[in-house]
Amino acid sequence: MSSGYQAPLADMSFQLFDVFQVDRFWAEQSTLAEVVDQDTAKAILEEAAKITEDCIAPQAMNADEQGVSVSAGVVSTPSHYKENYRLLCEGGWTGLTGAPEYGGIGMPKTLASLYDEMMCSADIAFSLYPGLTSGACVALLQHADERTKATYLPKLYSGEWSGTMCLTESHAGSDLGIMRTKAEPQHGGSYRITGEKIFITAGEHDLTDNIIHLVLAKLPDAPAGSRGISLFLVPKYKVNSDGSLGERNTLICSSVEHKMGIHGSATCVMNFDGAEGYLVGEPHRGLACMFTMMNYERLAMGSQGIGAAERAFQNALTYAKERTQGRVNTKDANKADPIIGHPDVQRMLLQIASLNEAGRALGIMVGHFLDLAKFAGDAKAQAKANLLTPVTKAFMTDRGFDACVMAQQVFGGHGYIWEWGMEQLVRDVRIAQIYEGTNGIQAADFMLRKVAPDQGAVLFDLLDQLLSEAGAEFKVELTAIVEQLKTASAEMFRQALSQPTLLSWSACDYLDLVGYLLYAFMWDKMITALDSTKHSEDFISAKKAKASFYFHRVLPKVQALLLQLKPLPVQLESPTF
Amino acid sequence: MSSGYQAPLADMSFQLFDVFQVDRFWAEQSTLAEVVDQDTAKAILEEAAKITEDCIAPQAMNADEQGVSVSAGVVSTPSHYKENYRLLCEGGWTGLTGAPEYGGIGMPKTLASLYDEMMCSADIAFSLYPGLTSGACVALLQHADERTKATYLPKLYSGEWSGTMCLTESHAGSDLGIMRTKAEPQHGGSYRITGEKIFITAGEHDLTDNIIHLVLAKLPDAPAGSRGISLFLVPKYKVNSDGSLGERNTLICSSVEHKMGIHGSATCVMNFDGAEGYLVGEPHRGLACMFTMMNYERLAMGSQGIGAAERAFQNALTYAKERTQGRVNTKDANKADPIIGHPDVQRMLLQIASLNEAGRALGIMVGHFLDLAKFAGDAKAQAKANLLTPVTKAFMTDRGFDACVMAQQVFGGHGYIWEWGMEQLVRDVRIAQIYEGTNGIQAADFMLRKVAPDQGAVLFDLLDQLLSEAGAEFKVELTAIVEQLKTASAEMFRQALSQPTLLSWSACDYLDLVGYLLYAFMWDKMITALDSTKHSEDFISAKKAKASFYFHRVLPKVQALLLQLKPLPVQLESPTF
């Protein structure tokens, strides 16, 4: 690999405290004020930087090469994962956002999203083991009964146990309504779970003493389709009443997938053979419970895109400064200058950085909406977070993939060779566009469930608010684009009355359009927050260059996307292939 | 893998004979008329389809899994490569475009480019072994002396021997002027070649009795930089005067690269240790000789993009018809419809197909320009081929990669799993954007050497010609975009007088802009050529749907690219990172 990873702490602090001033909100909320302030947060980020830079990132290529293996149901993870996982547990990282009443640390989402980014820069595959656990905890905290929470959450927050989400079956991917896994009621209130689940991240591994599966299954009296799905907690080892581990449950990992990337992550086929499970939440309401977890994960997916792209950028920048090819300043035909002198290399680096830093900002903004909802009960903020969840998942991972591919391109032929680590970043980040609901499904969710039902009301409220806060430099241009978007949206909704599939056809382009516009607002926010008394000249000029690049060379894409929203010609309604 | 590969023979015939009517030109040229007409060409394409569909394509995943290995300088290719290579030689495919006076078959480039596409659909890695040989033959035919041609070309055309191009050194990628490999004159007119070359495709393997390396090196009296490079023929085994193999030359493969994809292709580090070599062409004129080969390969690169994307499309289409998820028509909540019913899946399939078929057309058009130049001495056609060579290399491989990624997305999670073959296509096609000069270098070549020197004269001539041939349906829109391009180009050239780096900054966007516009012209040509007496209703409606999709949902990208050509703000002239 071309260089070590260095967490972008300066930009993280700038965004948290200068751009979004989240510490003001923290100080106002007693539950937050007790655990975090600006100094604490900076210390936490520095500790996160240490563990990701020193312990996790240096081993990511090793993990890619080793991969995982399974033998008789026992999965072995890459050799150093155990030690790094132990370090995470010791440092309390596994319970970072957990509820304090069950042993969690209760940190705000804004801070946690930056920790997520660092973990994903360091090693996406490794990050999934604690990542899935966090998601499971969110679902349990919200839907499980008190006894279940008291039994499981402390062990999950401490990292002693880990969690999974078992949704997919081989014939049923995102279409959960047609799943076949059965749950049969037993005496004593438990259930026997029988069925096969695939693509189960961290379904089996050697990092924890127990694995707590959250499994979707159908009760005997289940209504057809997605309204007949219930959620069950199914532990690998049953838990005795004193909290100690009991007998092994009847479930097993029958194989692990051979994947394009994230080789260190165990993607398991899980067989539940009458395994003992416990209902979480109401019968037939499992999908709603699972969506709590899915939404949490979807936001974390955005961090995967930014995390991989940040590391790709750092590697490309270092390489561009060191690699000499061609002559920019030197006159000696036998010598060469660093390739960073070439405009096309500068273009690629600026494009990557302008996407990454805007994406980081968007993640913090959405995290802050979630914090406003969670800690201050702000329903409007919750609505905005719901609106933007599919955008952060899809747009940040699509742009993260683009950025990794572009950074790989900076390396020329060396980018294609394993030794430099760039092709791994491309392979690893690719999954983020697919799992937790493909980006096409995110776009459909955004268009059909979040935007169309209120004809864009929440979206336009948010954009108007962002406009009202916009600085002078970009306000005119942003106002014009918001107006274009409103006009095009109204026309699209009108056309959709007579062309019902138009919204589905346009969903991906519409999500991209909103994404590029939001990134522009993020650049506006960053430029507005620059302060010559607090920031160095270099920091300021770098930010201005990236913002300028974004407005001149990236944002014009919205003009193409606006044109692409027009109604479809008739023959596209049912195309022949 | 989801399905077998089927060569798109109907579209290939349509494009060759209805769209470009290349058979009329063949009939006019006596050298071509002797070897090919429409029936012969169709028979050749059918034979090419058989060998690629039945023998090569079914083994591509096996080759990816096996990869290549090296031990003591001996490279082993995947187990079935020998047999398939033998079939290619027996069928005469290795000499398809070769000069008949040395045993080649003398086929036109338009036909060969479709054969190239099929080979790349079947297995890019395998295609490189005969592919590099073809390139080496082109360079030898043009620059070697008669004795060299008589000695080497027949064995290369027959496939008994293979060829390489040895340019890159570890410190010198595309910047060949700084290379260090030395050539020392010997008594008897030969040279001793000493140096290390990296990234040598097919540098060593077990498919042929001999390997003929074309090596760039510097003579002792070489001027500095790229004007001091000479080209040498360096055989693995020296060739006796009777054409039989003599002693082993002092060159060896010291290692093979561990790459993202094309695992079946041996990418070698080659050490030349005073190896005997023979000057090809004039001293210090090696770069010009090598560019003959590079230009040939660059055009073939476009076929790699289309080839991989065509196979990705076929797989995605089959999967979309078979995979059931969600309900489109069915009312039963426990059942699901094929995902091809979803508008977003149709959108992805149409986008891929609209790019692939336009790319195939562009490849044929440029191939036809090359045939006009080669067989009829048409200098204007040669100028157009020179102009478009970087566009076919960069744009067709960039869009080919996009298409493969999008086709992988159609598969959801299964696209990320090795078994379905989609992630391999993405990994394999990625190299085409990098080797033979990165796409950024292609864009610089296009802008700085092909367009700017004559202020776009050849380009605009070509576009005016295409406009004059345009059908009624798209003529108004195409005329408007050509005018926009001319205006924007004139403004860009004017601005570049005071902002010298502007052309380099804008090169990639400008190439993309021209590429999207050319693809639109290709769709115009295809629609104009549809004839209800010759083509089935399904064929016609599919073409119309793809064209319509292209104009409504892809071509608007040119509007964004036009905006992106504007001059840069000052701070981007020397950005801080």
Image (tube, coloured by chain):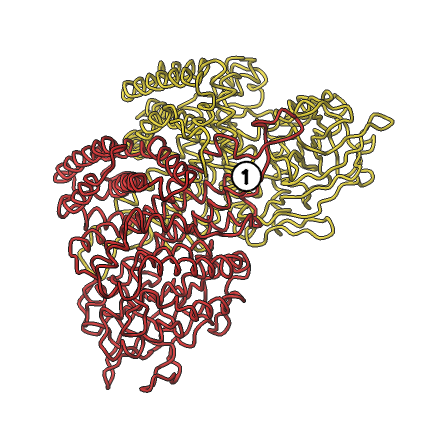
Chain colours: A red, B yellow
Q: Nearer the viewer, residue B281 or A145?
A: A145
**Residue B194 visible in the shown view:** yes
Say which amino acid is labelled 1. Answer: Lys
Q: Position of residue B329 (x, y in %)?
A: 20, 51
Residue A199: quadrant of the picture: bottom left
Counting the numbered discs, the total is 1
| Crowd tier of the residue under label 1, counting other residues whose Cα lies within 10 Å: few below 14, some 14–19, many 20 or above | few
* Chain that bears disc 1: A
Q: Which residue is mark 1?
A: A321
Q: Position of residue A271 (x, y in %)?
A: 38, 72
**Residue B347 visible in the shown view:** no
Give left or right: position of A500 versus A316: left
Q: Position of residue A198 (x, y in %)?
A: 37, 64
Give left or right: position of B105 versus B222: left
Above or below, comparing residue B105 to residue A456 in the picture: above
Q: Residue at x 83, y 30 (%)?
A: B241
Q: Nearer the viewer, residue B81 or A256?
A: A256
Q: Nearer the viewer, residue B231 or A218?
A: B231
Q: Position of residue A21 (x, y in %)?
A: 28, 51
> Going by the picture, which residue comes out furthest to the right?
B187
Look at the numbered disc 1 and give the secondary structure of its residue: helix
Above or below, comparing residue A149 to residue B327 in the picture: below
